[in-house]
Amino acid sequence: MLFGKKKKDQPQQPATIKEALESETAADEPQIEITEAEVSADGDAVSSDQEAVTDSPPEEANDEASSPPASFKPGQGPHDSKDVDSTKGYIDFGAILVPAAKGQKIRLDIDQKTKRVVSLTISIGQASIQLQAFSAPKSGGVWQDVREQIQESVTKQKGRVRILDGRFGKELHARVPTVLKDGRQGWRAARFIGSEGSRWFLRGVIGGRGAIDRKASAGVEELFSRIVVVRGDDPLPPRELLKLKPPAGAKRITAPGQQNRANGVSHSTPRGPSDSSNDSQNP
């Protein structure tokens, strides 16, 4: 499905200078492409959405490369909704508020069985990031447990894992073996980042070129730093998937050629990252 903002009828020619300026401002608003795709559970920590690379994993030279200036304003987040003064310029997906930017593509990953939105996948340039927000205990410590679970899952897939220091602290770089389109043996790569807030945990899975090149991931990393998480006041068990929803006021248009796709997301009743039996849903 394709979501687009409903357009209001506008006069062909603004009657005043003020109206002309307002019309120009509206035209400059970022055009955000929001699509909807059903996903199937494949149980992989590194899914088929992630970048396929050459038949032997290169050294992580690019991981230490300095990041170029991003198109987003600097931020120290992700942020808690109670700590921000304004969410103007953000797209409301329920538990996750996403800053709008030109050239940004957002995909809603839908559970085939329940039709529930289970994650957001955002593409900027050659990189993508899959976002999921979970409830968490006040004591924290979720991200360390989750890294261990992901490492175990990648190992079961006969993959390789490295824990490195990144912009948001410890992050996990994973590669699992796959067969490339030309028949050669290759690898699927993904970077897992995480941030813990006030009774919530936000997980990001960086894919595309950004999984193997920090310069390519600069945009999605800056986006991650500006995400606002809406935890809510309802009591929830630790590691419960927070509710996501399509943005209000959007209309659906059937997207041509849409296919089901695996995105490393589980579609059973959310049990959170503590359930090692389904790593694809775990944060």
Image (tube, rainbow, N blue to C red):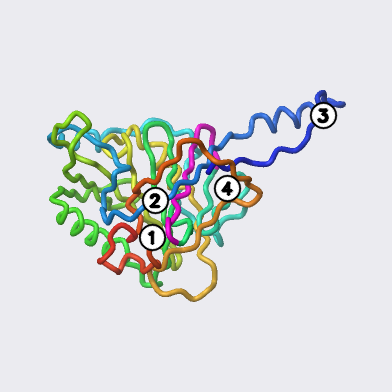
**How busy is the neighbourhood of tag 2: few (under 14 within 10 Å), some, or many (20 plus)?**
many
Q: Is residue 61 magenta?
A: no
Q: Spatial distance from mark 2 to mark 1, Cα to Cα? A: 8 Å
Specify the segment rendered in magenta.
Answer: 100-113
User: Which amino acid, by three-letter code, is at mark 3?
Assistant: Pro
- Mark closest to the chain's N terminus, 2 or 3: 3
- Nearer the viewer's eye, disc 1 or disc 3? 1
Q: Is residue 255 above or below residue 131?
A: above
Residue position for label 4: 91
Q: Spatial distance from mark 1 to mark 4, Cα to Cα? A: 24 Å
- Indicate left or right for 127 with 227 as reference: left
**How busy is the neighbourhood of tag 3: few (under 14 within 10 Å), some, or many (20 plus)?**
few
Residue 141 figure quarter? bottom left
Tell me residue 132's x, y (percent): 41, 56
User: Which amino acid, by three-letter code, is at mark 1?
Assistant: His
- Mark closest to the chain's N terminus, 2 or 4: 2
Identify the element where label 3 is drawn.
loop
- Nearer the viewer's eye, disc 4 or disc 3? 3
Q: Residue shown at 24%/42% (left/top)?
A: 189
